[in-house]
Image (cartoon, grey):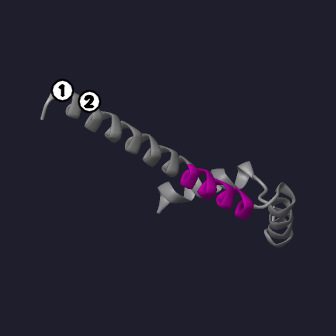
Amino acid sequence: MDSTALKLFLTQQQEAHKDQLVFLQQQQEKLLETILKKIGTQTDHTSILNSLNGRIATFKYNSEDVGRRIKNSFAG
C-alpha cells in the first residue's frame, strides 16, 4: 500500500466515522425528545403531590414525647 492509497483509506475512514457520529447524535436527540415528552408537565407532578398530601397525616414534632422515648429506651 503506497502513501496515496493509505491517505485515501484514512480519508474514507474519517468520513465513515463522521457519518456514524452524526447518526448517533441524531439517535440521542430522538431519545431525549421522547424522554422529555413522557416526563410530563409540572402540573402533573403537582397534582400527584397534592393527592398524596391529602392522604398522609401531617407530622408534628413533640419534644416531650421524644424525651420520654429516650428515657424509656435507657430504662429498659
Looking at the rendering, the stretch of residues picked out in magenta corresponds to: 26-39
Q: Secondary structure at mark 1?
A: helix
Disc 2 residue type?
A: Lys
Taking the view exactly as shown, the residue that stands out farthest to the left is 1
- In the rendered structure, the answer to whether residue 35 lies left or right of residue 17 reads right
Main secondary structure found in the magenta portion: helix
Kindly identify which residue carries mark 1.
3
Please give the name of the residue rendered at 75% of the width and 53% of the height, measured from the top-left corner: 62
Kindly identify which residue carries mark 2.
7
- In the rendered structure, the answer to whether residue 75 lies left or right of residue 15 reads right
* Of residues 56 and 21, the one drawn nearer to the viewer in this rendering: 21
Please give the name of the residue rendered at 83% of the width and 65% of the height, measured from the top-left corner: 53
Please give the name of the residue rendered at 72% of the width and 48% of the height, measured from the top-left corner: 63
Whole-angstrom CA distance, mark 2 to mark 1, is 6 Å
Please give the name of the residue rendered at 54% of the width and 47% of the height, measured from the top-left corner: 25
**Magenta segment: does it hold 41?**
no
Q: Which mark is residue 69?
A: none
Taking the view exactly as shown, the residue that stands out farthest to the bottom is 55
- In the rendered view of the protein, which quadrant contains the N terminus? top left
Where residue 40 appears, as percent x and y from the top left, is: 78, 61
* Of residues 28 and 44, the one drawn nearer to the viewer in this rendering: 28
Where residue 33 appears, as percent x and y from the top left, is: 68, 55
Disc 1 residue type?
A: Ser
Q: Residues within 10 Å of mark 2 (few under 14, many from 20)?
A: few
* Of residues 7 and 55, the one drawn nearer to the viewer in this rendering: 7
The answer to whether residue 25 is above or below residue 9 is: below
Q: Secondary structure at mark 2?
A: helix
Q: Are marks 2 and 1 in contact (CB under 8 Å)?
A: yes
- The quarter holding residue 69 reads bottom right
- In the rendered structure, the answer to whether residue 63 lies left or right of residue 71 reads right
Where residue 42 appears, as percent x and y from the top left, is: 83, 55
- The quarter holding residue 68 reads bottom right
